[in-house]
Amino acid sequence: MRRHAVAYGLLSAGALLTVFPFVWMVVTAFKPDSEAGAMTLDLWPSAWQWENVTRTFQVAPFALYFYNTFAVAITVTLSVVATSLLAGYAFANLRFAAKNVLFLLVLATMMIPFEVALIPNFLIIRGLGWYNTYAALIIPWCANAFSIFLVRQAFLGLPKDYFDAARIDGCGHLRFLLRVAVPLVKPTLVTVALFAFLGSYNALMWPIIVTSDKDMRVVQYGLTVFWGEGGVRVNLLMCASAIVILPTVAIYFAAQRYFLESSLSAGIKG
């Protein structure tokens, strides 16, 4: 019993440490300017300023930023799922020349830091005439090696009997992929979609580099408008941060079951 009490105590302490910054962020979002600017760890404001939400949307056009962000993030997510599904299936179940070498080259791209490819990618975007367009925000991120690796491993974990039985019944690769394989690797696909969406939704550096038009900005850029030479408007910044984080929290809880299934089955072979 004592051991369980110590374990629950440590878990509770860890949970409080994890949750406190988020609680402080939400409460600070509704503090008056003077109290928020003091940057204390006091939780409760002397008076709740509910109009801070309206002020936040007046400072920056977050409705437009959310539209751009969701348009980009959803398109990137669907593209990553499609490319990972096709490439992962090919690397797992098809036979073609230099398959292993090509797969190693795909994995090798994971070792290249984003900053190394930043300038070449920007020059390519400028050369194609995509600067200040959705294409610049979407196309460079329509595929990634990590997602291909995850899907390939999921397909390798499926019993080969499924594929053999489908071939005997006259089922082609595409039909087998869509009718049989996809439902079996659904948790992995949801995990890939979750990572792709969060990566696109939270992107800041790349959107700032390839866009200069205010109509093409995304929500992460909107968080940068609350500080300047006059200082930081902490309460409005915290309010904007709370608003921006809500969609990601909602999506994570909606996909949590599939994410956990994928994590638990990662080390299990069928």
Image (spheres, rainbow, N blue to C red):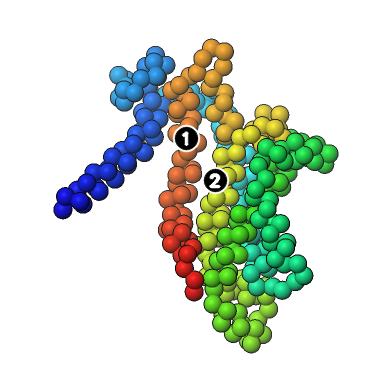
Identify whether 55 is placed above or below 252: above
- Count of marks overlaid on the render: 2
Element at badge 1?
A: helix
Q: Quadrant of residue 95?
A: bottom right
Instruction: Kindly identify which residue carries mark 2.
Output: 198
Identify whether 255 is placed above or below 180: above
The Cα–Cα distance between marks 1 and 2, rounded to whole angstroms, is 15 Å
Is residue 86 among what the camera can see?
no
- Identify which residue is drawn at 70% across, 32% down: 209
N-term-proximal mark, 1 vs 2: 2
Residue 85 placed where, x, y %? Answer: 63, 63
- Mark identifier at residue 243: 1
- Identify which residue is drawn at 68% across, 53% down: 108
User: Which sits in the foreground, 111 or 208?
Assistant: 111
Residue 55 placed where, x, y %? Answer: 48, 23
- Identify which residue is drawn at 48% across, 49% down: 251
**Circle 1 or circle 2, nearest the eye:** 2
The kind of residue tagged 2 is Leu
